[in-house]
Structures are given as C-alpha cells and as structure tokens.
Amino acid sequence: MAEAYDAVVVGSGPNGLAAAITLARAGRSVLVIEGRDTVGGGMRTAELTLPGFRHDICSAVHPLGLASPFFRSLPLEAHGLRWIQPDAPLTHPLDQGEAVVLDRSFDATAAYLGRDGAAWRGFLQPLAAAWEDLLPDLLGPLRLPRHPLLYARFGAGALLPADTLARVWFRGRRARALFAGLAAHSIMSLQRSLTAAYGLTMGLLAHGVGWPIPAGGSQSIADALAAYLRSLGGEIRTGWWVRSLAELPPARATLFDITPRDLVKIAGDALPAGYRRTLRRYRYGPGVFKLDYALDGPIPWRNPAVARGGTVHVGGTLEEIVASEREAWQGRHTARPFVLVIQPSLFDPSRAPAGQHTAWTYCHVPNGSTVDMSAAIEGQIERFAPGFRDRILARSAMNTAQYEQYNPNYVGGDINSGVQDLFQHFTRPAVRISPYTTPNPRLFLCSSATPPGGGVHGMCGYWAAQAALRA
C-alpha cells in the first residue's frame, strides 16, 4: 500500500507540532493526530474556576519559548502570538517582609543581593550575554558543542548539586535562596548532581530574554504553531486517541510525542523485546499538585516589590527549599513546600474580569501522590501575603492522577516526562547514538522524554524530525 503521508505525528504538544513543522518545511506531507479536541499538550488555557477567568492548565511562563532556537526561526507573531514581559522575571519573598527581585538588569538585581551582587554578576553575566550561542548547545542531544569554551564555562558549575554551588558561591541568604528557587525547576533533590545546571539556565534566561507570558494564555502558543503548520500544508486531526499502530494511516515515518510507557503500548511487537524492556525501566520523577485561583484582587504580598514578578518563588530560604525538594524526591510530603506562583493577570488583563485576578500555583509531590496539598500551598502564600485566603473567589485543584488523566505524558504527575538527572538527561529514553530513533527505522520518539527534556521549546521535536529526515 502506498504511503498516505510522508510522516504522521502522534501528539500535538510543543514537540509534536515542532516535529510536524520541521518536516513540512522540508516539503514533506504531514498529519498530526491529537487525542483531545484542541491542540497543545501542556500549552492549553481554560476557564477552570469561574467564567471569565482564564487559567493555563500546565505551562504558564516561557523563557525557553522565547529563547528556543527553533521557535525563533518561525513567524509565530504573524499567526497571533504576542509575548508580554512582566516588570521583572522573578521575585522571591523572604520572612520579615524581605524580598529579592531578579531583574533583567544585573545592576538592579545586584542591589537586592548586597555582598553577593558581584558574585551573581560574575557567574551569570558572561553566560547571559552569550545566551544565543550557548542555548543551541544546551538544547539538544549529547554532541560536540559549537562553542566549547563557553560550554565549559557553563559546565564548570552546572555539574554540581545546586545546594553545593549556592553554599560555595554565595554568602548571604538572599542569593542562596534565589538560586535554590531557580534550581528547583529541575524537580529533583537539590543535593543531586546537575541541579545547578537548571539554576544557571533559568538565571541566564531571566537576564538574557526574560520570563515572558503569552498574551491570552499558553493556548496562544499552540494555536500559533498549529496555524503556521496548516499554512505549510500540514493537516491536524483532533479527538483521535491512538491505541495501536494498526489505526494509523500508512506513512514513511511515524513520530510520537508521547511517553516511553505509551510507546510500548502502541507499538507493541513492532519494537524488539529488549528495547521495550529498556523503555519500561525508564524512570519518572516527582509529580505536581496544582491549584488555580480566581481572586477578587491581586495577591497582597507583604513586600509590594513581589508584585513586580510574573513568577514568584515561595519557599523561603535555601535550607527550606532544599528540604522541600528532598522530601518530594524521597517520596514524602512536607507542610512547607516550595511553591511556584504565577500572577499573569497583573500584566495581561485578558486573563480575568476587570479588577479581578488569577493565580497559578503548584508544588512538587511524590510521583503518584493523591494527597491534597491545598492547605500547605495556601499556608505558604499566606506566610508572605497575609490576607491571601480572603481574596479567593474560587479554586481548582489537580493532583497527580488528575494531571496524568489530563495528559498521559505526565506519568504520576511528572510534567518533565522523566527524571532529568546526570544519567538520564542525555540518554533519555535509552542509550542510542540518536535518542530519537528506535530499532524500527520507521518509528521515532519526539517527546520531552528525549533530549533536551521538559519545557516549551520544541527542540525535542525538531531534533527528532531531523533524525527522520536523515533516515
């Protein structure tokens, strides 16, 4: 039977759409199949609480979306995407009304860090100044870097545990806490190697490109990618959950924006038994418990400077954040979790009715946890914003099981689709010369279970499509 398409892509997250666009730009006929009624994967926005309050279901702030070498090559603004830069990328409240503001400006940030300002600048400014050269080396499979000296400068600190780098490099609690919050985006214990890499990457992006939000919500990114794909002749079919290869139309290549667990289920005997066993051993990390809020006003931060940030890291000191992330990593819950807070309606009025606001929050929990962390999250926010609970009009909660039900790629609530530690970062999902290929020459994996891993950047899909074009 003749192939109906050059390529079929299963899944329409950022990587599935990126793979399809890469193939379509190369002149290939492409079909994207999505199980839900709308495209997007982790890039969806919905009224989760009350009418008129628009909440991002998963991703909300997108430094990698703006910095991605692949996304930067696309005319997404022409298809409706508009980035909004909050007044500051990030703020971090501390007790007694203290706060740190991570500003785009190194001078402004250093003013908050006091005696550690020079150390912060010395470590991050050279990396932030060269982010356009560094990012392509970081956002890809293991290979010889194009800028080896710059990569080595990054790697000198990146391989360390974040807890170690923070204690060695900084002396005061402000800089240590700020770096710990950045590194906690790794969703690993901050006492493990490579977690410093996440702190450095998130920090250099904050200074280099900011931490922007998309106007209207993350669905805007998905819609722009889908519109551009259609302009290239690509097709998209929604509402089709793929259960087996037999369902798919004939194609020269099939790319899967799914987890290794589900690739085994769908592909079955089309993959060798040994490779299937390897995929079953793939490790998933802690999950998230998420709360979205409709508020009758902005969060009443004790220190008004905290409202400058589109993103707020709520967790206190380095020691507290390290303890919180260690507990989740070791399968336990904590009464004082590190909480990621996004306050998009301060900068994008389309997210809530006039005079009202939204808040997006989550904390890390053990994989598969069904514990309700609402009280713990609200207690942490109230700690730095007395009166927060009085502002709540409605809330929407998602535990790890509900998150996985929403998106099967989030196994046990793991939004990174797998642990990104030193071993599994470059070998995800298996040790192969090209991690995007499988032993079946027609089947490819393009999800965040391949390098460079989680985040809305599309680079996993781009690299997988390149592998398919070479096959």
Image: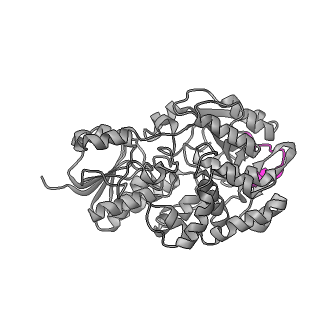
**Which residue is at the far left?**
1
Q: Is residue 221 visible?
A: yes
Q: Quadrant of the C terminus?
A: bottom left
Q: Residue at x 80, y 43 (%)?
A: 300
* Along the line of sight, the residue nearer the viewer: 376 or 272: 272
Residue 18 placement (x, y as % from top left): 41, 58
Location of residue 102 in the rendering, given as x and y in whole percent from the top left corner: 73, 58
Task: Give the residue displayed 37% in from the left and 51% down from the top.
Answer: 431
- Image coloring type: one colour
Q: Position of residue 44 (x, y in %)?
A: 51, 46
Taking depth in this image into account, of 283 and 313 the one nearest to the observer is 283
Q: Position of residue 255 (x, y in %)?
A: 32, 52
Any part of residue 91 in sight: no
Q: Nearer the viewer, residue 240 or 271?
A: 271
Residue drawn at the location 46% of the way across and 69% of the way down: 73
Which stretch is magenta?
Answer: 296-310
| Image label count | 0
Q: Nearer the viewer, residue 272 or 302?
A: 272
Q: Residue furthest right?
A: 96
In the image, residue 98 sits, relative to residue 330, either above or below, namely below
Quarter of image, res 252: bottom left
User: Dividing the picture into quarters, in which one does residue 235 lie?
Assistant: bottom left
Q: Is residue 14 above or below residue 321?
A: below
- Is 307 contained in the magenta span? yes
Task: Please state if 367 lies on the left or on the right of 273 as rendered.
Answer: right
Residue 203 included in the magenta stretch of the image: no
